[in-house]
Amino acid sequence: MRRILYLVGLVALLAACGTTGRQHGAAVKGPAGVEEKDPLTYGQRRKFDYFFLEAVRMKEKGDYDAAFELYRHCLDIYPESAATLYEISQFYMALGQEEKGVDALKRAVQSDERNFWYKQTLAAYYQQKRDLPKAVAVYEDMARQFPSRLEPLISLVDLYGQAKSYAEEIKALDRLEELDGKSEQISMEKFRCYLLMGNKDQAFSEIESLSKEYPYDMRYQNILGDVYLDNGKTQEAYDTYQRILKEVPDYAPTILSLAQYYKKIGNDSLYHAQIDTILVNDNVPSDTKMELMRNMIFVSEQTTRDSTEIVSLFRRILERPQQNADLAMLCAQYLITKKMDKEAVPVLDQILSIDPENKPARLQLLVYAIRDNNLDEVIRVATPALEYNPDAMEFYYYLGLAYYQKENMDKALEVFRKGVRQVDEKSDKGIVSDFYAILGDIYNTKDMKAEAYAAYDSSLVYNPDNIGTLNNYAYYLSVERKDLDKAEEMSYRTVKAEPENATYLDTYAWILFEKKRYTEARIYIEQAMKNGGDTSQVIVEHCGDVYYMLGEKEKALEYWKKADGMDPDPGDGSTPRTEAELRRLKRKIALKKYIAE
């Protein structure tokens, strides 16, 4: 606002005084065409204009100290310059010198009575300081001086309302209505004022006047009925609603209002019958039902907040044939908002039966399935999405992951291959990186090493900091005893990122083991064991291997036996151990020595 006020002030100043071509004593046009003389000599005007414009330049540059001094110099030349007084008042306000600021602002108003914005700023200051009488005085003066402007009247309505001066507020509303025409907002505010003043007849007359002003707008007729109903005039409300429905039989707001009328008079059977006339009527357009249900939800949230009735209504509606999925979507959104997840699932399924391309509904079902770790449900929900939402990467990701965790590697590979074919420049790089990471893991389980490493490389192209990729890539390289320097570098980054992750610590320890740096390997394998690795068969076996190479053969045997007694299934969705690995563990125990292959 200050920026806008400043520009207006500057334009006003330049229009009033000019910067070129004015001779000393030249006349200018003032209010009502009256000629006014420039109060400055030609030389003073040139100096003033120069310093003022230089002050503007300094202010635009952010050199406020210099701008402030230049404005002060302008006042030395022309103490009554309204534009300068306004600008310097803003500086004083910013410096916390309010007394000086408001004094300069008042002087600016006095120097240029025609400037709307100077007065607006002064009135807003009084309003902010809660000095309502002074704010009202300035706005009333503005309303008289600028009879075509709405802003002063709108502010007066607010101020008189705060002061509970309802008669004065109505006068301001009347003037606003003369300028802007009748409106729902103005009439409702006048209605409220009349009620607060105890003048009910005038209050109802105001709403009746609004409905007569727009006789063909059923919304205003309905407002009149609602006002009657809310204020105990039930017969008048009923007559109004009947009159509307005679004109427009399917007018949804009035049907709902009439239902509220029956509820208010305690006739529950007619209330439910009235709602049923529209909500379970197959011939009523879906849009009308949507509007009614939104109104019902709004009324419920504003009053009882009891979801039971709303949910019951939705059930009755959704039992009927649906024209589209809109009402089911509204129901699902309501249930989700109310955290009624169990009830939302069949509704979401109904949405998909009507509109199988509905991505939000399918995603919500997927969220529930993932949360419950229900892999079969993930597969059920995500599989059709590859046909109906083929460009949505998340469906390929979670479907492939579900197959992967169910150890159906062929199906997982098929899904992920389809998924990467959808990748384009708009794809989320993080998701694409994870796609390739899992592809790499799948290729490894199928002993397709070259394809696995290519997939890991692609993963790191999309996200060089993908910690899971770095760990698995490094581990599989170490198992093959190739590129161990590269493996060590990648693995070290994972340990730095998550120094308490047992899996990453184990990978790094194993790479050091393969590089025959057994003492260092011991440090990291022991850290892995302390951070939960003692529950992993692989890590416990690796711990035994490290101790063996350090000459602690009894300790090594102890850990191999412990590993042999553990469940070989990782239980976390990672690759299970092969039969060859398990046989090698038993051979280590039988021979009491480390076996590499």
Image (cartoon, helix red, strand yellow):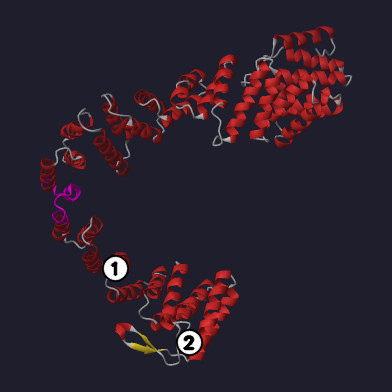
Name the residue located 58 percent from the left edge and 14 percent from the top edge. Answer: 410
Left or right for 366, reference 513: left
Residue 224 magenta: yes
The reply to whether residue 471 is in sight is: yes
Q: Position of residue 497 (x, y in %)?
A: 70, 36
Name the residue located 45 percent from the left edge and 87 percent from the top edge. Answer: 22
Closer to the camera in the image, 155 or 455: 455
Q: What quarter of the picture does the C terminus occupy?
A: top right
Name the residue located 18 percent from the left edge and 40 percent from the top edge. Answer: 251
Q: Quadrant of residue 103?
A: bottom left
Left or right for 311, reference 362: left
Which residue position holds label 1? 153
Q: Position of residue 552 (x, y in %)?
A: 87, 19
* CA distance separating discs 2 and 1: 32 Å
Crowding at mark 2 (Cα within 10 Å: few <14, some 14-19, many 20+): some
Left or right for 170, reference 596: left
Q: Are marks 2 and 1 in contact (CB under 8 Å)?
A: no
Q: Residue furthest right?
A: 551
Disc 1 residue type (three-letter): Leu
Q: Quadrant of residue 595?
A: top right
User: SS for tag 2?
Assistant: loop
Mark linked to residue 408 = none
Disc 2 residue type (three-letter): Pro
Q: Position of residue 34 (x, y in %)?
A: 31, 87
- Of pointers 2 and 1, the one earlier in the residue sequence: 2
Left or right for 469, reference 344: right
Magenta-drawn segment: 210-235
